[in-house]
Amino acid sequence: MTAAALAAALAAVLIAAAGGRAHAGQPPSISPKANYIERCGGCHGVDGRSVAALVPDLKHTAGYFLCDEEARAYVARLPNVAFSQINDADLAAMLNFVVLDLGARDGPPQPGAAAPRPYTAAEVGRLRRTALTIPDLKAYRQRIVGRLVARCAAPDRLLTDYQGPPTPSP
Ligand code: HEC
């Protein structure tokens, strides 16, 4: 190999190595689904179902939260979501996996219904800054899901399954 060829080969290796380290210092980017499983699956279940009385099911129900502005904001403002240790873009991608894929309604789309609008990184970034810190999250949720059942054809189980945190025994 000539010196010039050697230099060229070395340069190619260095460029490849630099490319591989382009995101050094940042956590490796993983898929929205893998992020969900890692950060949310412990409570909500890998496939969006766990113990519905203690943690709401997401499978075929989370998508209904896109029905109105307060409901879509509720999802991004939930403390477990808002304080998740990922950046706005990754969080938006993960939430879109949750509402458009995992939580998509079962069956054909509602006739006349507008296509669901995905979350953007900017929207999630804005919403997570006002994370919900209200003491009675369950009452707040019940009001929202009551509306989703009444106005957005969401299934009744959204209202009936989740019982909230267990009340401490006296
Ligand atoms: C420690 C358990 C826990 C973890 C971790 C958790 N959640 Fe939740 N999640 C809950 C509970 C409990 C609720 C019901 C509202 C409340 O009391 O917080 C909820 C509500 C929700 C809802 C609204 C569904 C409904 O029917 O109210 C969505 C969507 C959701 N979580 C998504 C996520 C995502 C995405 C993550 C991961 C970033 C996550 N959750 C992590 C426990 C958890």
Image: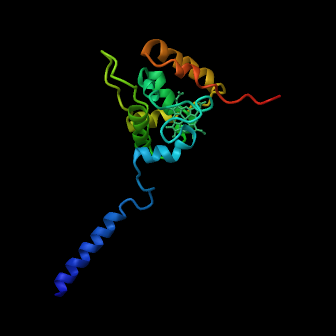
Does any portion of residue 85 appear in the rendered image? no
Q: Quadrant of ligand 1?
A: top right
Q: Is residue 29 left or right of residue 137?
A: left
Q: Kindly give the residue lying farthest to the top in the view shown.
A: 150
Relative height, residue 73 to residue 159 (above, below): below
Relative height, residue 27 to residue 76 (above, below): below
Q: Is residue 93 left or right of residue 4?
A: right
Q: Residue 126's x, y, as percent?
A: 46, 34
User: Coloured how?
Assistant: rainbow
Relative height, residue 46 to residue 168 (above, below): below
- Residue shown at 64% from the left, 25% from the top: 163
Q: Kindly give the residue lying farthest to the right in the view shown.
A: 170
Q: Residue 100's x, y, as percent?
A: 38, 32
Relative height, residue 47 to residue 152 (above, below): below
- Residue shown at 56% from the left, 43% from the top: 42
Number of numbered discs overlaid on the protein picture: 0
- Residue shown at 49% from the left, 36% from the top: 48
Does any portion of residue 9 appear in the rendered image? yes
- Pick the front one: 161 or 4: 161
Image quadrant holding the C terminus, namely: top right
Q: Residue 32's x, y, as percent?
A: 41, 44
**Residue 4, quarter of picture:** bottom left
Q: Is residue 53 left or right of residue 169?
A: left
Q: Kindly give the residue lying farthest to the front in the view shown.
A: 107
Q: Residue 9's x, y, as percent?
A: 22, 78
Image quadrant holding the N terminus, namely: bottom left
